[in-house]
Image: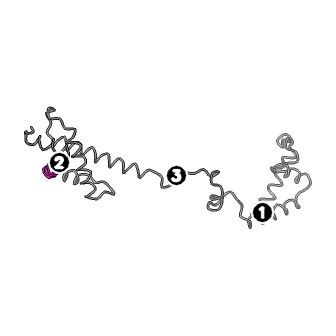
């Protein structure tokens, strides 16, 4: 249990007496050393941890009640461990935060258009080669094959036409497709 002299020092430290606080901190320094040795807090140096331990000691002295049948040392140790766990949790939570806040592409379109590569955009050289291949394919196809090929393109001359219903158009498109595949390979 706590002696009357120790309780007086705790009360004086809680009221802001520097000498009482320093005596109390030095008396309970082994608790601080044990917690510092058992737990690692990334990014905090010994002086930072000691400052946190001093703050916890001051708050513990302010809130300590003598009639609870708990020694001040175990109360301080418990509070200090809880503070260390809070610091560790806080440190780990900061690791999960993004380094920069996310922005929508539409919000800053000018920036993203100059810095982000558009993988769906065609390479100009590949576009010229493909255009040349389509022109050669178009010249080698019959009239029906050309019409079937035009129906598949996005700007189809007859968007309502369904190739599956007309077998001859479907066959013409297949011949056109095979001609294209044979030219590329």
Q: Is residue 165 above or below residue 134?
A: above
Res. 17 mark: 2
Tell whether position 61 is magenta: no
Left or right: 132 with respect to 113?
right
Mark 1 touching mark 2, by CB under 8 A?
Answer: no
Q: Quadrant of residue 136?
A: bottom right
* Label whose residue precedes the other's in the sequence (1 or 2): 2
User: Considering the image in quadrants, where does the C terminus appear?
Assistant: bottom right
Q: Which residues are magenta?
A: 16-29
| Crowding at mark 1 (Cα within 10 Å: few <14, some 14-19, many 20+) | few
* Label whose residue precedes the other's in the sequence (2 or 3): 2
Residue at (63%, 58%) from the top-left corner?
112
Q: Is residue 132 above or below residue 17?
A: below
| Crowding at mark 2 (Cα within 10 Å: few <14, some 14-19, many 20+) | few
Q: Quadrant of residue 128?
A: bottom right
What kind of element bears circle 1? helix
Percent x, y of residue 33: 19, 53
* Label whose residue precedes the other's in the sequence (1 or 3): 3
Percent x, y of residue 85: 30, 46
Furthest residue to the bottom? Answer: 125
1 or 2: mark nearer the eye: 2
Mark 2 touching mark 3, by CB under 8 A?
Answer: no
2 or 3: mark nearer the eye: 2
Res. 130 mark: 1
Residue at (17%, 35%) from the top-left corner?
65
How far apart in space, not on screen, are marks 1 and 3 (Cα)?
A: 40 Å
Q: Kindly identify which residue carries mark 3.
A: 101
1 or 3: mark nearer the eye: 3
Left or right: 97 with respect to 32?
right
Residue at (80%, 54%) from the top-left corner?
177
């Amino acid at each position: 249990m706590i002696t009357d002299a120790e309780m007086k020092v705790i009360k004086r430290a809680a009221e802001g007496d520097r000498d009482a606080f320093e005596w109390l901190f030095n008396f309970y320094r082994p608790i601080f050393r044990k917690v510092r040795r058992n737990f690692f807090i990334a990014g905090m140096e010994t002086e930072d941890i000691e400052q946190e331990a001093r703050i916890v000691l001051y708050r513990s002295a302010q809130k300590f009640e003598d009639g609870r049948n708990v020694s001040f040392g175990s109360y301080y140790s418990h509070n200090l461990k809880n503070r260390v766990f809070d610091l560790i949790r806080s440190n780990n939570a900061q690791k999960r935060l993004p380094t920069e806040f996310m922005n929508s592409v539409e919000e800053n379109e000018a920036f993203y258009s100059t810095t982000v590569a558009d993988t769906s955009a065609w390479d100009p050289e590949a576009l010229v080669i493909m255009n040349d291949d389509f022109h050669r394919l178009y010249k080698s196809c019959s009239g029906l094959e050309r019409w079937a090929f035009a129906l598949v393109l996005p700007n189809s001359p007859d968007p309502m036409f369904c190739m599956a219903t007309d077998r001859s158009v479907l066959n013409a498109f297949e011949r056109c497709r095979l001609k294209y595949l044979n030219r590329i390979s």
